[in-house]
Every structure is written in C-alpha cells, then in structure tokens.
Image: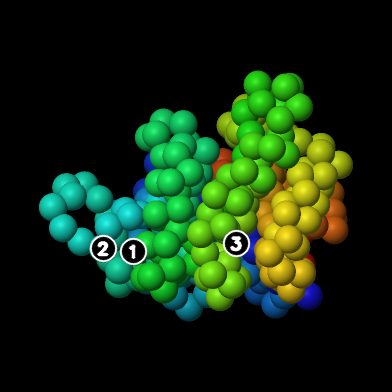
Amino acid sequence: MRMPLIAGNWKMNGSLSLVEEFGRAFAGISLPVNVEVALMVPFPFLGAAGQALGETAVTVGAQTLSDRPSGAFTGEVSGAMLRECGARLVLVGHSERRALFGEDDAAVLARVQAALHAGLTPVLCVGETLEEREAERTEAVVLGQVEAVFDALDAAERARLVVAYEPVWAIGTGRTASPEQAQAVHAAIRSCLARYDAGLAGGMRLLYGGSMKADNAAELLAQPDIDGGLVGGASLKVDDFLAICQSAG
C-alpha cells in the first residue's frame, strides 16, 4: 500500500509570519495517519519551518539544489546544506526550473544524483507543455523525462525517488487535467517503471501537480495511480492545504 504524499510548493512566495501560521495550525490538528505531508519552502525559511513544524507531522522540503557538493558557486545551495537546515525532500526538475533556468534532462539527472548523495528524497517533476499535448506527444515527452533519470540510476537509487506529473499547461493557469487525463498519464508512468522492475512500479508514489485545489483534490486522489499531490497556490492557504491533506486520508 502506497502512502499518499501531499507536498506544498510555495515557490517564491510566503513569509516568516506565514511559516509561523502554518506551524500553529498544524500543531493544533491531527492529520490522517496514513498520509505524509510536506512543505517545500524557499531557502531562507527552511530553518524557521523546521522549528515551526517540528512538533507536527509535516516534513520540510526544498525547491531545488545545486548539482555540486560545494565550491565557488555563488548563490547555489548544496544538498548537504539543505539537510543541515532540516530539509528531507527536494523538488528536482520542476517545469519552472526547466523552462526559466534552462535545466535539461542532464541537469535534472545531476541534481537527482546530488540529492540522493546528500540523503534527500528527490521529487522528480515531469510534464508536457500545451503544444506537446496538442501534438499528441504527452507520453513521449513525459516518459522520456522519466527514462532520462531512471536509466542512469541503480535499483536502490530508483526506489528512493518520488515522481510528480505536472502538466505544464495546468500550472498557474486555472486549468486542471481531468481526473481521467491525469490518471492516464500516471498509469503510463507506472507502466514505464514496470520495465525496470515490477516492485518499483508497484511501490513508487506518483503525485499529480497541476493546479490541485481543495475542490478537486478528492476526485483526483481517488484515481488508482495518483498517490498524492504537488500543490502550488493552494499550499499558501492553511485551510485549503489542510482540506487537501484531509482528502488524501
């Protein structure tokens, strides 16, 4: 049985006061025991989030990392630094990193490997643009991104990942893939993983990351191959994020 994971991605948003608000809110409620919850906060808030959420069941994560362990790379943050600040998960290959910062499949792989080396759980983000979907290239693009990473890892490394499918055309646009559309891609990813190992495919958590909200989470999470969500804007609102977490229980 795969434990659902609801991961909130704050992107370049939030504040220390919001971190504290989440800490107070989640300290006062009981999350479903069969659901893992994480908040991926901006680098400056990692320490504060660890303190604010330390007495809760919420795990702290980061939004990216350097592919280098240390050195003269001004502005970069290593996996070891993230671990020391309390992060346990890290997003890798988010569509905004790919599109805005030029991270190609090779760069994504290097960051996955850096995360694994640092003892972090990489949440590998994959997804297609609207143009690619309309050209009926969804599976070719998404599975190509998956294979670019999984082909280079050994069996033990593969098992440590989480995969998040984020249709680029549904991020921040208000559009959401229908549950059937999302399920179809998740099923294709799981079939792809089965080519490496049936146990890997059966145990891998696949998250949906395209504008999941409180009012559509339950229907999306009811799909057989959707094991949680990578939540954007709704993760900045305590009540909305909590409602999504409760939907996964």
- For image coordinates 26% across by 63% down, the residue present is 69
Q: From the viewer's perspective, is 27 left or right of 107?
A: right
Is disc 1 in contact with disc 3, using a CB cutoff of under 8 Å? no
Residue under circle 1? 79
142 relative to 6, above or below: above
Image quadrant containing the N terminus: bottom right
Per the model, the C-alpha gap separating discs 2 and 1 is 7 Å
Q: On the rendered image, what quadrant is the C terminus found in?
A: bottom right
Give whichever of discs 3 and 2 has the lower sequence position.
2
Q: CA distance from mark 3 to mark 2?
A: 22 Å
- Rendered image quadrant of residue 178: top right
- Crowding at dot 1, Cα within 10 Å, few <14 / some 14-19 / many 20+, comes out as many
Compared across the picture, whether 82 is left or right of 205 comes to left
Identify the secondary structure beneath mark 2. Answer: loop
Q: Quick check: can you spot residue 220?
A: no
User: Is label 2 or label 1 in front?
Assistant: 2
The residue that mark 3 highlights is 162
Compared to residue 74, the image places residue 30 above or below, namely below
Where residue 109 appears, x then y in whole percent? 45, 53
Sequence order check, earlier mark of 2 and 1: 2
Residue 134 on image: x %, y %: 73, 22
**Amino acid, disc 1:** Gly
Callout 2–callout 1 Cβ contact below 8 Å: yes
Q: Residue at x 30, y 68 (%)?
A: 80
Q: Which residue is mark 2?
A: 69
> For the residue marked with disc 2, what is the amino acid?
Pro
